[in-house]
Image (cartoon, helix red, strand yellow):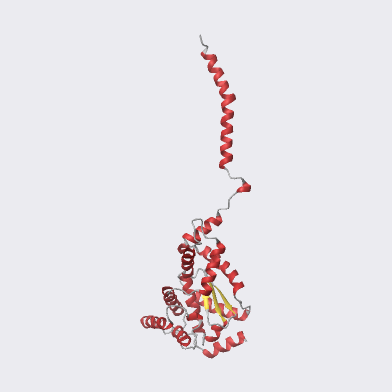
Amino acid sequence: MINWQGFRINYHLWTRRCLYPLISVSVALSLCLSTILPSKAIDLSPLLFQGVQIFNLSNISDRDEIDLGKQMNQQLHKEVKISHNSQLHKYISEVGRRLAANSDRPNIPYTFQVVEDAAINAFATTGGFIYVNTGLLKAADNEAELASVLAHEMGHIEGKHLIKQMREQAIISGVATLAGLDKNKAVGIGVQLALNLPRSRKDEFDADKRGLANITRSGYAQSAMISFMKKLQSSSSVPAFLSTHPAASERIISLQRQINNQPSNQNNGLDNLAYKSRIRAFLR
């Protein structure tokens, strides 16, 4: 006859002594295998940032856009010669801040810089970074014309045109992958586009429209935007500022139509002598 009570007691003792340690070891092993050691930890923030760069550029946050602009600015300082004339920088920034207060994105901390280059050109990157050549400053007849150029470039930032171009270029060039876009590649693409490649026809018209609305709200003469384009259009060589599609003549017609539809009696910034005198003092 089997002593069931004794068997049950011995069985429970055997379970505690043999199975419980095995279970403990199994749990410990599973925890070790599923837990990433501190020395092997993966920093997910670059991957998250890369994902934003590739798949959500059209919805990029202001903070990330500004950070991207700062990185591009660091690279651009190696590509172009930035003026360190404090008086000139102060003047351009004063005009720029006046426009920024009336822009569609006044929450962005706009940064205005002067490039020492005789070419008539201006360009913008992302996050409020705008650059204007000394050649363009000399070509402008008055502050209103200068303001029209800055407002146009501000229009590109308001429309996030470069960001859209970056996304398209990354896909075309094949550097956009499921893993994301390396930040250095993103910066490189952005700098290349800002310096060398023209905006699309749609983007140029959009920047003109936004720029005209901006100078109107800021009190500058609307006519300055057209007078500047006409002056450059009649020059012997097409400047870099207008060497994009659509042609300047088309943009002038479009701007004139907008002015006729919504005229303004504001005529600030048309003092040619005051502007020329000031610019000569800055650029001598």
Q: Tell me: 284 left or right of 51.
A: right
- Residue at the location (61% across, 45% down)? 37
Q: Tell me: 32 left or right of 161.
A: right
Give 5 or 46, whichever is nearer the viewer. 46
Whether 136 is drawn above or below 40: the answer is below
Give 17 or 195, whichever is nearer the viewer. 195
Q: Position of residue 278 (x, y in %)?
A: 58, 87
Question: Quadrant location of the C terminus?
Answer: bottom right
Q: Tell me: 81 left or right of 158.
A: right
Q: Position of residue 87 (x, y in %)?
A: 61, 81
- Residue at the location (60% across, 73% down)? 79
Q: Position of residue 258 (x, y in %)?
A: 38, 80
Q: How many marks?
A: 0
- Residue at the location (52% across, 84% down)? 143
Q: Residue furthest left?
A: 261
Q: Residue furthest top?
A: 1
Give 248 or 264, whichever is nearer the viewer. 248
Q: Position of residue 116 (x, y in %)?
A: 60, 80
Res 185 → quadrant:
bottom right
Q: Is residue 109 visible?
A: no
Whether 115 is drawn above or below 37: the answer is below
Q: Is residue 187 visible?
A: yes
Whether 242 is drawn above or below 28: the answer is below
Give 32 or 92, whichever is nearer the viewer. 32
Res 69 → quadrant:
bottom right
Q: Residue furthest bottom?
A: 273
Whether 79 is drawn above or below 54: the answer is below
